[in-house]
Each structure stands twice: as C-alpha cells, then as structure tokens.
Image: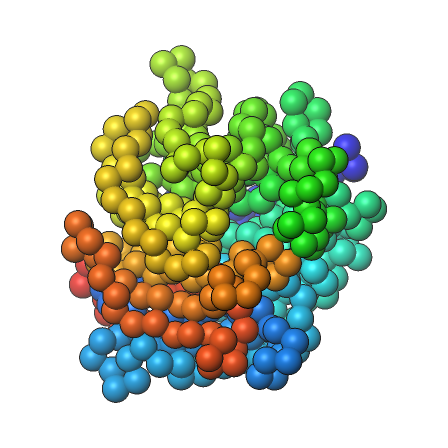
C-alpha cells in the first residue's frame, strides 16, 4: 500500500467529529448528510452533467440546466448551457456542504470543475478548475464528490502508475485546496478498488464500493467484454471505514462491482444497500446481533443471465423503496424495501433504449432518468439515445412529464443530475418543513 498521508488536525475538527451532524436528508435522497438548504418541495431546475460529442454542437463537455417547475413558462426546456471546454469523460457531481457550489469531475483527464449554482441557479457559472488531483495524489478519475463540513471528499477510480483499479480518496477544502489522500486497502481482503462513498454520521461509518480502472472504463464496451483478462479487473469489495480516523476497519467481499451506496434515511434505520453491476444482485450492509457490520446478498435484479447491468439506484426518503436502473435493457425498476432483508420488485417500465442515472424528488412524486453511461460504453446506432426524461410517480405508475432530447438539442450525452431551487425559495421550503 502506498504511504498514507495523515489527515490534518483542522480537518478532523471539521469532519465530525465533535460537532452535531445535520439530519441525513436530501432532495434526490442520495446527497451527503452534511449538506444544508434542502429542497423538500418542488425543484426549480435539474442540472445535467453532459459529455461532449465530436461534431455535435460546440463539442464540449457542459452543465445543462433545465427548467423543472411545472408553473414556469419554460417548463421542460433547456434554459442554460455552461461549456467547460474539451471532452474528458464527465461523470458525477456533488454539492458543497452549503449547497452553493457543484463540484463536477471528468474521468479521463481528472479535471474537477467548481460551479456556482447558488447565486443564480438558472445561470450556473464556472468559478474554478482544479487540475492537481493526479500530481498531488497519484490518483486518476475523480468519481464521487461528497460534502464534509468545509471539505469535499473525492473518490477516485484509478491511478497514475498503471491506470489500473487500485486507487483512493482525497479531501480538498471548499476553496479547492488539496488536503490529504487515503489509499483504498489492499490488505485483509482488500482489492484497492473504489467507486462510491456514503456516510452514516451516527455510526461514525464511511462505506466505499468498487468498480474498475481507467484502462477498462475508457475501453470500448464490446472490446472489453471480449477481453477475458480485462473482465477480471473489476472490484469485488466494499469497505467500512472509521470516519473520524479515516482508516479502513473491515473489508466485505461483494462480487461483481458494487456501485452506488444508499443509506436508509428513515430515522432509526442503520443499514445501506447497493447493487452489484456484473452479477445483478442487491446487497445489504447492516450490523448483526453482535453489533458487527456485515454485507449479505438480499435480492436479484432482473435476469442475471442476461446481464441487465444495474447502474444507478435511488432510495426513497422513508427507506421503504428503491429505484434501480438497468442499462442494457433500458428498464427502471422499483423494489419494495419494507423488509430490507428481502427486497421485492413491484414495478418496472422500459424508460429508454439505454438508461443510466435515476434521481427522485424528496416527496417521491417525480423521477428523472438520463441515458449515458460512458462514452465508449454507450450503445451504437439507433440504440444510442441521449436524453433526460422526467416522470410523475403516483405510487403505481410512472407517467411522462417532459423530455429533452440531447442529440436533437446538440448538447451531447446526458449523465449525472442534481436539483436546485431559486434563491430564497429553497430556504423557505426547508423552513416550512421544519428544517
């Protein structure tokens, strides 16, 4: 394992670790529990981090802003597009703890873009580009951006040494200053791979999951599937970390690249769920009768023999339901988590020829789906749809609300989503809901 750079004392003070953590709530239910100014009513805008396509529009990666308020005259329309220059495999975003900025990363060139969405969310502005992840940490591919008090915790996917899957996490301060690095464990069952982050402050627990390195995620999917050696290079672990110490405590064996991690947001619940992409299985992480954290397989997504490739998941605010998108068959599924030990699929709908990300409003009445997975993994020809599709959910059926065709609008490949509300209205909504 590479030498671990110890976290600074000032960072420890901000992490927790002696301050009361806010309640773990968020609009699309998958943000950091340290994030404030929550939207629990109608979101005004949905921001889509979008991959540029050669020969299409300005060809650049961009943040696309779409009006999502049904009362607006521009409802369902693109109201702004912020190009950041070049194409570097944009992927995920995360809010700072004050929700004023979005940090958005690229998996190829490892650039991180800090975007002001607090001043005027209808017209986001690029305020900073961070280009030192590789030189400072030796890591490549910033994937997950997870707010800490005054800090941003970033999970990388790869490394500069061999572009493989052994990687780690870094922290920056909110001004973009590099703070520290933490290596994913390669001992005691660890494979060194990383992907997502999720924190349970009450349990002083950070969970991480695992995917694959640059050599694989930048390869054409058809070629990758035929490469037997490359297919062996996917993560098969999750790790439980002591949050205060930022040290790994236990490695769980979770085969098949466990991706997004979602803690139940129901007060009193202390369990998390994830989906393994290559095995099409749901896994639960919770404490056993002796208080020890365990991971176990609890459900199946579709027909694993067909490799539906579950990608993104979104848990409901009450912890009783889970949306799952499967890329290969373009299906959005809903699982009843009334008993998290035995999830049951109760609904499914084909929402595209390919689907990736799924986000929902806090009240669970609106569900948003985007299409792109990775530039070299997306389908070809007529199956290469690129869109944002919004649906209304009445508890029984998804019905279309609006759609933006990203190819028709010459925008690119639609990937990750985040919601904002107009200044003043956001705080008012939170106040009305007792927050």
Quarter the C terminus occupies: bottom left
Q: Residue at x 16, y 55 (%)?
A: 394
Question: In front: 317, or 372?
Answer: 372
Q: Can residue 27 be seen in this view?
A: no
Quarter the N terminus occupies: top right
Q: Which residue is drawn at 61% across and 61% down?
A: 375
Question: In front: 57, or 41?
Answer: 57
Question: In front: 42, or 230?
Answer: 230
Please identify the residue farthest to the top as the structure is shown: 290
Q: Is residue 393 visible?
A: yes
Please identify the residue farthest to the right as the structure is shown: 161
Please identify the residue farthest to the bottom as the structure is shown: 73
Identify the coloring: rainbow
Q: Which residue is drawn at 39% across and 31% down?
A: 300
Residue 276: x and y in percent read 50, 36
Residue 209: x and y in percent read 55, 38
Residue 330 lies, with reference to residue 241, above or below; the image says below
Count of numbered circles in the view:
0
User: To which quarter of the image does residue 420 belong?
Assistant: bottom left
Q: Is residue 207 left or right of residue 266?
A: right
Residue 312: x and y in percent read 44, 49
Q: Is residue 427 left or right of residue 60?
A: left
Residue 146: x and y in percent read 51, 52
Q: Is residue 204 left or right of residue 225?
A: left
Q: Which residue is drawn at 55% across and 52% down?
A: 144
């Amino acid at each position: 394992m590479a030498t671990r750079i110890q976290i600074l004392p000032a960072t420890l003070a901000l992490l927790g670790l002696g301050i009361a953590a806010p309640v773990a709530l968020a609009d699309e239910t998958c943000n950091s529990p340290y994030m404030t100014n929550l939207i629990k009513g109608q979101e005004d805008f949905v921001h889509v981090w979008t991959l540029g396509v050669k020969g299409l529009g300005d060809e650049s990666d961009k943040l696309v802003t779409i009006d999502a308020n049904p009362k607006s005259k521009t409802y369902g329309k693109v109201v702004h597009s912020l190009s950041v220059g070049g194409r570097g495999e944009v992927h995920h975003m995360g809010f700072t703890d004050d929700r004023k900025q979005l940090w958005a990363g690229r998996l190829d060139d490892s650039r991180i873009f800090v975007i002001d969405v607090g001043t005027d969310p209808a017209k986001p502005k690029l305020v900073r580009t961070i280009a030192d992840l590789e030189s400072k940490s030796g890591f490549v591919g910033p994937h997950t951006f997870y707010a800490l008090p005054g800090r941003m915790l970033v999970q990388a996917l790869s490394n500069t040494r061999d572009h493989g899957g052994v990687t780690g996490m870094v922290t920056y301060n909110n001004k973009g200053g590099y703070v520290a690095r933490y290596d994913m464990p390669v001992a005691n069952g660890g494979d060194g791979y990383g992907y997502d982050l999720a924190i349970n402050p009450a349990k002083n627990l950070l969970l991480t999951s695992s995917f694959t390195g640059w050599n694989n995620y930048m390869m054409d999917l058809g070629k990758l599937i035929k490469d037997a050696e490359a297919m062996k290079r996917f993560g098969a672990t999750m790790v439980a970390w002591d949050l205060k110490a930022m040290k790994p405590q236990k490695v769980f064996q979770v085969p098949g690249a466990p991706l997004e991690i979602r803690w139940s947001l129901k007060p009193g619940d202390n369990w998390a769920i994830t989906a393994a992409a290559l095995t099409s299985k749901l896994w639960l992480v919770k404490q056993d009768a002796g208080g020890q954290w365990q991971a176990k397989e609890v459900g199946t997504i579709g027909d694993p023999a067909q490799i539906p490739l579950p990608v993104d998941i979104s848990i409901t605010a009450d912890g009783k339901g889970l949306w799952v998108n499967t890329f290969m068959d373009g299906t959005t599924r809903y699982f009843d988590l009334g008993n998290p030990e035995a999830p049951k699929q109760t609904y499914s709908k084909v929402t595209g020829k390919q689907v990736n990300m799924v986000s929902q409003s806090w009240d669970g009445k609106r569900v948003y789906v985007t299409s792109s997975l990775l530039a070299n993994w997306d389908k070809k020809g007529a199956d290469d749809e690129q869109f944002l599709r919004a649906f209304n959910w009445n508890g029984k059926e998804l019905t279309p609300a609006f759609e933006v065709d990203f190819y028709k609008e010459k925008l690119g490949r639609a990937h990750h989503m985040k919601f904002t509300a107009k200044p003043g209205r956001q705080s008012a909504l939170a106040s009305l809901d007792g927050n």
